[in-house]
């Protein structure tokens, strides 16, 4: 079993206002999402409490909440472990993501103005710089921001709410393949921006569907390696 040893500088600071248990929950969820705490890793309450500078009680409450949401597995007589997603779980989530993102791309092509397109261009440039610098965490973060911006430009509140529900898990699955996808992912982003700029709804839909499908197949390939 793995202990909760964390790389230097990965532990988020609990500075935001709000109940301590919520801040501990957010900190642990971020560590899981970024894979600082990897799938299958043993989560020891006392060690996590020490890393975060809190007592064990809010850590215990956070782990129970993460268990309810499927991020953590609580095993009798063994303790808490970061959930290890099955191939089927990943496939189902990434398939739903494709549906949501393809519709968002279509709506963005119909609705985006010049300011929105300029914002996509800037996010894409930042993502490309992160890839060039081999900054995996930065590339993952910029990928999430790029897709969130397209969702925002779509202008459909319900669609955005549904996408937000799967966004954290998309990041979780994307992190281990970010380096593999590398430049190609941002080339595909550039093509998406062109379709949105041209207000070509059909092309934007097709490109986003292909783009998210590439992520899905890359993830499955990484699990079989």
Image (tube, rainbow, N blue to C red):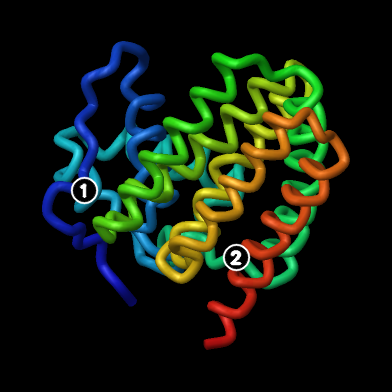
Residue 165, position as x, y percentages in the image: 66, 34
Image-based side of 4 in relation to 164, left or right = left
> Closer to the camera, 190 or 69?
190
Q: Is residue 147 above or below residue 185?
A: above
> Closer to the camera, 180 or 108?
108
Q: At numbered mark 1, what does the secondary structure look like: helix, strand or loop?
A: loop
Q: Is residue 77 above or below residue 46?
A: below
The numbered dot on residue 80 is none
Q: Is residue 79 above or below residue 59?
A: below
Q: Quadrant of the N terminus?
A: bottom left
Question: Which residue does the image show at 45% across and 66% down from the upper left?
Answer: 176
Task: Let me know if residue 76 appears in the view.
Answer: no
- Marks 1 and 2 sit apart, C-alpha to C-alpha, by 22 Å
Image-based side of 129 in relation to 76, left or right = left
Residue 196, position as x, y percentages in the image: 71, 32
Residue 66, position as x, y percentages in the image: 51, 43
Residue tagged by mark 1? 10
Residue tagged by mark 2? 85
Which image quarter: residue 54?
top left
Hey, which residue is sitting farthest front in the picture?
198
Q: Dots 1 and 2: beta carbons under 8 Å?
A: no
Mark 2 closeness class: few <14, some 14–19, many ≥20 residues within 10 Å: some
Hey, which residue is sitting farthest right in the picture?
202
Q: Earlier in the sequence, mark 1 or mark 2?
A: 1
């Amino acid at each position: 079993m793995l202990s909760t040893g964390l790389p230097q500088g990965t532990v988020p600071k609990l500075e935001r206002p709000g109940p301590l248990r919520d801040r501990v929950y957010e900190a642990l969820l971020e560590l899981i999402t970024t894979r600082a705490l990897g799938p299958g890793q043993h989560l020891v309450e006392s060690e996590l409490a020490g890393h975060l500078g809190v007592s064990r009680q809010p850590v215990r409450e956070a782990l129970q909440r993460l268990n309810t949401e499927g991020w953590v597995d609580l095993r009798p007589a063994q303790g808490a472990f970061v959930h290890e997603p099955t191939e089927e779980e990943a496939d189902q989530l990434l398939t739903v993501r494709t549906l949501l993102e393809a519709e968002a791309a279509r709506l963005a092509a119909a609705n985006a103005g010049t300011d929105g397109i300029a914002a996509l261009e800037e996010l894409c440039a930042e993502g490309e710089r992160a890839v060039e610098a081999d900054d995996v965490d930065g590339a993952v973060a910029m990928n999430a921001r790029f897709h969130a911006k397209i969702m925002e430009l779509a202008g459909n509140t319900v669609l955005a709410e549904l996408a937000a529900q799967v966004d954290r898990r998309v990041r979780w699955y994307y992190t281990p393949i970010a380096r593999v996808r590398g430049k190609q992912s941002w080339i595909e982003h550039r093509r998406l921006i062109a379709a949105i700029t041209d207000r070509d709804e059909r092309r934007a839909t097709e490109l986003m569907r292909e783009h998210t499908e590439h992520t899905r197949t890359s993830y499955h390939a990484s699990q079989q390696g």
